Image: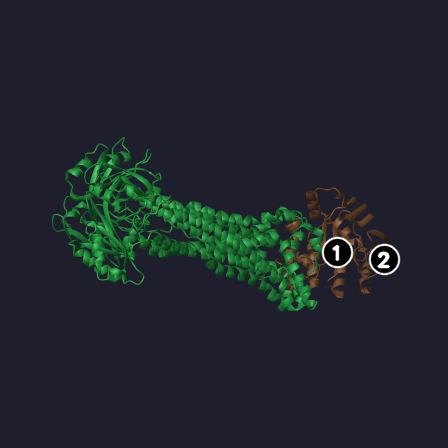
C-alpha cells in the first residue's frame, strides 16, 4: 500500500539539514505501523511525504499504486482527496461546524458526501450522543475522535496520524489507539508517528527513526501488547 | 532599559512582518483623517479668503445709491459726506457713476450678448481706493485712460465665457471699447442681478472704466449717482450712514443706503460658506467614522493574533504592563503612520477642493493653507481610536489566566459565536456551502464590525453620488421645462415695461431671424401661505404656439384664471391645485406707476421646474393687474435657418432691448458650475472607493491568517485552493451584501436628509428630489458587493504557497 524507496529529504540551502536519509519502507493494507523516534528524528517529515504534504528531495514514494514523488500539484490534491486521510495532534477540526458537519466535511472532501451518514460514523467512535455539538463544546478526546471520524468518512485506504494521543490523557489516548487499531483491522494501512514508545507496543510493526535513518523495523520488542497492558 | 529597546525592536519586527496590512490600515486611517481635514477645511479657507480679498480691495462700509435715473454733479456726494457732523469718522469716499448697459463680447465662435453695467470712477490714481479693481497682472487703468474708450472687464464674466484677458467689446449704443484686462471687485465676487438665482457670473457683465468714459457712454456728463465710503475702527457706522443719507437727501435726490453686510455679493459669500460646508461636514464625518470603525476592527484583529504570545509572557511572569507594551506600540506606530498619511491625503483633497473653489468663486486672494488646528483634533481621534483598538484585545488577554490565553492562541480555535444558534438550520449544499456562513456567525462581532465599516463607506458613496444625481436631476428637469417644445427659445428682456403693440415689440416680432414672438409681463409677487415666498410671475398667453410650462398637476386650461407654481413652492406654501392663495402683486395705478394689492388667486397647476420662484399666469390675468397689453419680456423663437446667435445679433441692435439670451442660459451656466462641483465630489468618491477596497483587502488578508490552519487542513484533505478561495469569496460576498444593503439604506437616509433638510434650508430656491442614477446603483453594487467579495483573491498566491506541514504542526 505504501512504498518508500531510497527516500531522502533535505531542508535549506548551503549546508542542508538532512531530515531523512535513504529511507526504504513498505506498509501493507491492514497493517498498523508506528513510526517511533525522538524530536528531530524525521518521523513527521516521513508522514508528510507519505501524505503528499511535502515532496522528497530524492527517492520514490508509491502509495496505493500512485507514484507521488513526481506528481503534479493537481495530482497531489487528487491523491490527498482519494487516498490518504489525516489525523493531527491538535485535531484541526473546524470550529464553525458541528461534530456531524466536521465528519460530513471529510466525506464531502473525498466526493462521497451522499454515501456517508455522519451520525453512524460518530456512533462508531463513541460520539453518538455528541453529533450536534460544536468543537468548543467537546473535550480534547472527543475532538480527536471527531477528527478520526472525519478521516474515516473519507473512505480512503491510508490513514496517517501525527501524535494522535499527544494532547490526550492516558484513558482517552488508549481509546483513540483502539479506534486506530480497528481501522487497520478493517483493511486500512494505518501509519502513526509518535515519540511515545509505549504506544508502539500495540502496533503490528515498529519503525524506529534516528537522525533521519531507520535504525530498526520489526514487531514491537517483547511482542505485540494488548491495550489493557499499556500505561504512561 | 535594555528591555524597552528589545520591546521596541520587537514591535518594529511586527510592523515589518505585517507591512502590507500595516500600510493598508494606515492608509485607511489616513484617508479618514485626511478626508475629514480636507473636506472640512473649506469653511475656514473661504472665510479667510473672503476677508483677505475684501481687505485687499478695501470693500466699502456704506454705499449710497441714488434713485433710478437720477444723478448729481461730480463732487457733490463727496462734499455732502464730508459735511456731516461726524465727518472725522469717515476714512475715505469714492464717487461713482453706475449705469445699466448691454454688452456684446462675442468672439469668432461664440455669441455673447448680455446685460451688464458700466462702473465709472476717478482713475487718477489707477483706480478706486475703495472697492478697488484687482487685475491678475497688475495692469489696470491709468490717468492716461481717462475719457478714452478703454475699460476693464469683470473677471468672472470673462472666465465663464472663455474670453481672452484683453480684447474688444461693444456696449449699448454700438460703442466699441477696448478692454485692457479683466478685473475683480468685491461687488462682483458673486454676481446677483435681480430676479435670478445667484449664479449669474457668466450672464452679467461688469464694465469698469474711468468716470469720464462712463459719463460719455451713458450720457450722464459730469454726473455721478453712487457714493461708497469706509469708516474708521472707532466710528459708529450707522450714525455715519444716517448722516450721509440725510446730507444726500438734502441735495434733492432719492437715495438708498446699503451697508456692507447687506451687499448681495458680501452676504452670499459669507452665507454660502456655512451652507456649503454643511454638505461636506456630513460626508467628511461619515468617511471618518467609516475609516475609524474599519481601522478599529482591523487593528483589533491584528492584536488578537498576539494573544497566545501574551499568554506565554504571562506564564513566564512578565508584568502585564510590559506585556501590553509591544502590541500597544504596534498599534501606536500604525496610528502614527496613519496620521502621517492623513496629512498627505488632507493636502491632496485640499488641493482638489481649492481648484474647484477657485473656479466657483473668483477671488483675488485664496488662503488655503493646511488647517493644522483642525487636523490636529482629527489626528488625535485618528490616533487614539486605533490605539484603543490595539489596547482592547491586549487588555482582555492580560486579564485572563495565562493558560486560557495560551489555549486560545488563535481566534479560529475559539468558541462558536452565534453558530450554535443556527446549528439546526442547514443550508442547501455540502459542508463547503455551510462553512462561509458558519465562519461569519462564529465571530459575529468581527463580522458586524467589518460589515458596518464597509456599510459606512457605502453610505457615504450613496450619499455622495446620490447628491450629484439629485443636483443633476434638478438641472435636467429645469432645462427640460425651459426647453419644452421650443428648445431654442430666446428670452428678450426689454429695458422697460411697454405696450405689447409698441413699435419696439413689433420690431422684435418682425425681425428676420425670429419665427414666433410671445410678449410676456414679468412681475415680482409675494405669496403668503404657510410661509411667505417671493415669486417671479411670467404672465403670457398660455395657449401660444411656442412654449408653455410643463405641468405635473392641474391643467393649462384651468390656468387661465389661476397661478401655476413650482412643486417646491406649493409644498413650502402648503397649497395644492385648487387651493386659494393670497398673493401680493403690483397693480398699475398710472402710466408708469404701480401699487401693490393683495389678491386671492387659485392654484391652477404645478409645473416641473425645480426653481421655486418661477410662476406663471395666463395673460387673461393682466386685467386683474390693470396691465392689459403690457410686456417687459418677449419670447422669440429663431426662424428656420437662423441660430440663436443670429437672433441675438439682430435683436441686440433694436431699440428698448435690454438683453437677448437663450432661455437655457442660466441652466447652461448652472450646468457648467455643477460640472466643477461634480468633479470634486467624484474626486472624493475616489478616496471613498479606495477606502472600501482597502478595508475589504485588509479584512480578507487578516481572515486568511486567522484561518490558515483551517485552510491547511482542507488542503491536507485534498480540497483545492480554488474551492477554499470560493468559500472565502462567499463569506466576503455575504459581508459585502449585508454592508451594501445597510450602506444603501444609510446612504438613502443621508441623501434624503441632504435633499430634504440641508438643501431645503440652504438652497430653498431649488427643489431637489432624491434621485439615484443607474450608474450610481451599479457603482455601489459593483464596489460594495463585487470588490468586497473578490478581495480574498488577493490571498490566492499566499494560499498556493502555504507551508502545509508547518501550518498544520502549529500547536495550540
- Residue topped by disc 1: A162
Among numbered discs 2 and 1, the one appearing first in the sequence: 1
| Protein chain holding label 2 | A
- Shown in brown, the chain is A
Q: Which mark is residue A220?
A: 2
Place of residue B800 in the rendered image (x, y in percent of width and height, measured from the top left): 65, 47
How packed is label 2: few (under 14 Cα within 10 Å), some, or many (20 or more)? many
| Protein chain holding label 1 | A
Place of residue B597 in the rendered image (x, y in percent of width and height, measured from the top left): 16, 55
**Which is nearer the eye, B88 or B241?**
B88
Disc 2/disc 1 C-alpha distance (Å): 19 Å
The mark lying in front, picked from 2 and 1, is 1
How packed is label 1: few (under 14 Cα within 10 Å), some, or many (20 or more)? many
- Shown in green, the chain is B
Circle 2 SS class: loop
Left or right placement of residue B50 versus residue B82 in this view: right
Amino acid at each position: 500500500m505504501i512504498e518508500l524507496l531510497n527516500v531522502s529529504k533535505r531542508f535549506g540551502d548551503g549546508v542542508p539539514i538532512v531530515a531523512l536519509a535513504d529511507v526504504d519502507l513498505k506498509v501493507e493494507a491492514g497493517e498498523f505501523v508506528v513510526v517511533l523516534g525522538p524530536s528531530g528524528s524525521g518521523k513527521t517529515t516521513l508522514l508528510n511525504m507519505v501524505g503528499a504534504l511535502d515532496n522528497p528531495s530524492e527517492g520514490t514514494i508509491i502509495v496505493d499504486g500512485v507514484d507521488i514523488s513526481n506528481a503534479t500539484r493537481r495530482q497531489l490534491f487528487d491523491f490527498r482527496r482519494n487516498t490518504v486521510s489525516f489525523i493531527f495532534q491538535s485535531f484541526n477540526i473546524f470550529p464553525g461546524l458541528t461534530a456531524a458537519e466536521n465528519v460530513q466535511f471529510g466525506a464531502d472532501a473525498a466526493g462521497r458526501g451522499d454515501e456517508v451518514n455522519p451520525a453512524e460514523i460518530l456512533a462508531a467512535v463513541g460520539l453518538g450522543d455528541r453529533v450536534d455539538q460544536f468543537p468548543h463544546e467537546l473535550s480534547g478526546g472527543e475532538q480527536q475522535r471527531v477528527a478520526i471520524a472525519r478521516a474515516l468518512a473519507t473512505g480512503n485506504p491510508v490513514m496517517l496520524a501525527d501524535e494522535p494521543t499527544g494532547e490526550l490523557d492516558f484513558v482517552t489516548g488508549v481509546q483513540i489507539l483502539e479506534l486506530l487499531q480497528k481501522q487497520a483491522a478493517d483493511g486500512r494501512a494505518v501509519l502513526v508517528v509518535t515519540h511515545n514508545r509505549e504506544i508502539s507496543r500495540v502496533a503490528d510493526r515498529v519503525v524506529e527513526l534516528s537522525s533521519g535513518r531507520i535504525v530498526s523495523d520489526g514487531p514491537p520488542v517483547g511482542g505485540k501488547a494488548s491495550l489493557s497492558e499499556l500505561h504512561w | 532599559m535594555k528591555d524597552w529597546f528589545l520591546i521596541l525592536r520587537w514591535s518594529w519586527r511586527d510592523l515589518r512582518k505585517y507591512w502590507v496590512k500595516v500600510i493598508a490600515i494606515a492608509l485607511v486611517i489616513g484617508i479618514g483623517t485626511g478626508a475629514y481635514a480636507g473636506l472640512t477645511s473649506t469653511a475656514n479657507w473661504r472665510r479667510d479668503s473672503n476677508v483677505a480679498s475684501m481687505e485687499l480691495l478695501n470693500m466699502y462700509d456704506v454705499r449710497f445709491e441714488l434713485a433710478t435715473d437720477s444723478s448729481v454733479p461730480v463732487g457733490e456726494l463727496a462734499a455732502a459726506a464730508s459735511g456731516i457732523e461726524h465727518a472725522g469718522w469717515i476714512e475715505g469716499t469714492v464717487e461713482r457713476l453706475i449705469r445699466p448697459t448691454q454688452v456684446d463680447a462675442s468672439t469668432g465662435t461664440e455669441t455673447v450678448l448680455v446685460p451688464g453695467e458700466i462702473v465709472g470712477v476717478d482713475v487718477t490714481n489707477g483706480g478706486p481706493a475703495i472697492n478697488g479693481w484687482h487685475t491678475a497682472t497688475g495692469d489696470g487703468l491709468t490717468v492716461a485712460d481717462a475719457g478714452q474708450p478703454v475699460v476693464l472687464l469683470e473677471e468672472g464674466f470673462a472666465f465663464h465665457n472663455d474670453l481672452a484677458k484683453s480684447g474688444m467689446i461693444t456696449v449699448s449704443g454700438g460703442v466699441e471699447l477696448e478692454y485692457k484686462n479683466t478685473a475683480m471687485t468685491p461687488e462682483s465676487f458673486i454676481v446677483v442681478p435681480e430676479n435670478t438665482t445667484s449664479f449669474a457670473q457668466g450672464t452679467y457683465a461688469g464694465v469698469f472704466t474711468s468716470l469720464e468714459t462712463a459719463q460719455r457712454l451713458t450720457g450722464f456728463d459730469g454726473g455721478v449717482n453712487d457714493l461708497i465710503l469706509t469708516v474708521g475702527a472707532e466710528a459708529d457706522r450707522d450714525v455715519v450712514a444716517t448722516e450721509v443719507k440725510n446730507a444726500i437727501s438734502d441735495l434733492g435726490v432719492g437715495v438708498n443706503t446699503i451697508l456692507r453686510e447687506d451687499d448681495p455679493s458680501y452676504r452670499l459669500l459669507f452665507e454660502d460658506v456655512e451652507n456649503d460646508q454643511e454638505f461636506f461636514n456630513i460626508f467628511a464625518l461619515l468617511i471618518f467614522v467609516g475609516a475609524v470603525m474599519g481601522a478599529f476592527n482591523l487593528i483589533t484583529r491584528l492584536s488578537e493574533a498576539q494573544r497566545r504570545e501574551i499568554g506565554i509572557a504571562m506564564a513566564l511572569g512578565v508584568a502585564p504592563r510590559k506585556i501590553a507594551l509591544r502590541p500597544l506600540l504596534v498599534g501606536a506606530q500604525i496610528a502614527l503612520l496613519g496620521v502621517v498619511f492623513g496629512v498627505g491625503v488632507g493636502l491632496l483633497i485640499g488641493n482638489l477642493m481649492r481648484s474647484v473653489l477657485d473656479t466657483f468663486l473668483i477671488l483675488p486672494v485664496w488662503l488655503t493653507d493646511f488647517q493644522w488646528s483642525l487636523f490636529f483634533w482629527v489626528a488625535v481621534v485618528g490616533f487614539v481610536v486605533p490605539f484603543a483598538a490595539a489596547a482592547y484585545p491586549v487588555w482582555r488577554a492580560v486579564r485572563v489566566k495565562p493558560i486560557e490565553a495560551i489555549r486560545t492562541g488563535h481566534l479560529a480555535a475559539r468558541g462558536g459565536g452565534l453558530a450554535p444558534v443556527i446549528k439546526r438550520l442547514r443550508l442547501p449544499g455540502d459542508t463547503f456551502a455551510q462553512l462561509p456562513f458558519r465562519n461569519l456567525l462564529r465571530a459575529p462581532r468581527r463580522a458586524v464590525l467589518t460589515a458596518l465599516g464597509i456599510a459606512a463607506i457605502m453610505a457615504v458613496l450613496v450619499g455622495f453620488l446620490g447628491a450629484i444625481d439629485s443636483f443633476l436631476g434638478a438641472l435636467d428637469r429645469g432645462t427640460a421645462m425651459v426647453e419644452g417644445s421650443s428648445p431654442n427659445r430666446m428670452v428678450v428682456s426689454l429695458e422697460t415695461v411697454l405696450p405689447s403693440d409698441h413699435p419696439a415689440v413689433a420690431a422684435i416680432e418682425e425681425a428676420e431671424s425670429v419665427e414666433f414672438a410671445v410678449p410676456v409681463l414679468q412681475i415680482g409677487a409675494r405669496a403668503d401661505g404657510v410661509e411667505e415666498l417671493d415669486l417671479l410671475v411670467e404672465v403670457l398667453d398660455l395657449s401660444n404656439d411656442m412654449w408653455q410650462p410643463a405641468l405635473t398637476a392641474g391643467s393649462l386650461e384651468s390656468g387661465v384664471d389661476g397661478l401655476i407654481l413650482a412643486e417646491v413652492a406649493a409644498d413650502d406654501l402648503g397649497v395644492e391645485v385648487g387651493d386659494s392663495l393670497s398673493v401680493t402683486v403690483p397693480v398699475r395705478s398710472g402710466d408708469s406707476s404701480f401699487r401693490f394689492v393683495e389678491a386671492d388667486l387659485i392654484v391652477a397647476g404645478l409645473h416641473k421646474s425645480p426653481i421655486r420662484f418661477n410662476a406663471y399666469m395666463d395673460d387673461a390675468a393682466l386685467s386683474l393687474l390693470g396691465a392689459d397689453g403690457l410686456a417687459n419680456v418677449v419670447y422669440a423663437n429663431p426662424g428656420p435657418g437662423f441660430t440663436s446667435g443670429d437672433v441675438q445679433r439682430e435683436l441686440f441692435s433694436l431699440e428698448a432691448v435690454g438683453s437677448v439670451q437663450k432661455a437655457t442660459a442660466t441652466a447652461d451656466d448652472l450646468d457648467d458650475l455643477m460640472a466643477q462641483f461634480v468633479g470634486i465630489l467624484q474626486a472624493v468618491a475616489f478616496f471613498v472607493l479606495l477606502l472600501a477596497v482597502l478595508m475589504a483587502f485588509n479584512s480578507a488578508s487578516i481572515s486568511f491568517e486567522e484561518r490558515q490552519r483551517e485552510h491547511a487542513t482542507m488542503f491536507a484533505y485534498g480540497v483545492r485552493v480554488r474551492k477554499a478561495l470560493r468559500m472565502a469569496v462567499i463569506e466576503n460576498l455575504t459581508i459585502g451584501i449585508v454592508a451594501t444593503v445597510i450602506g444603501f439604506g444609510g446612504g438613502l437616509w443621508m441623501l434624503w436628509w441632504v435633499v430634504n433638510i440641508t438643501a431645503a434650508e440652504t438652497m430653498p430656491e431649488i427643489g431637489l428630489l432624491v434621485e439615484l442614477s443607474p450608474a450610481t446603483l451599479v457603482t455601489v453594487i459593483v464596489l460594495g458587493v463585487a470588490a468586497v467579495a473578490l478581495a480574498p483573491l488577493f490571498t490566492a498566491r499566499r494560499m498556493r504557497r502555504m507551508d502545509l506541514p508547518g501550518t498544520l504542526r502549529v500547536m495550540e
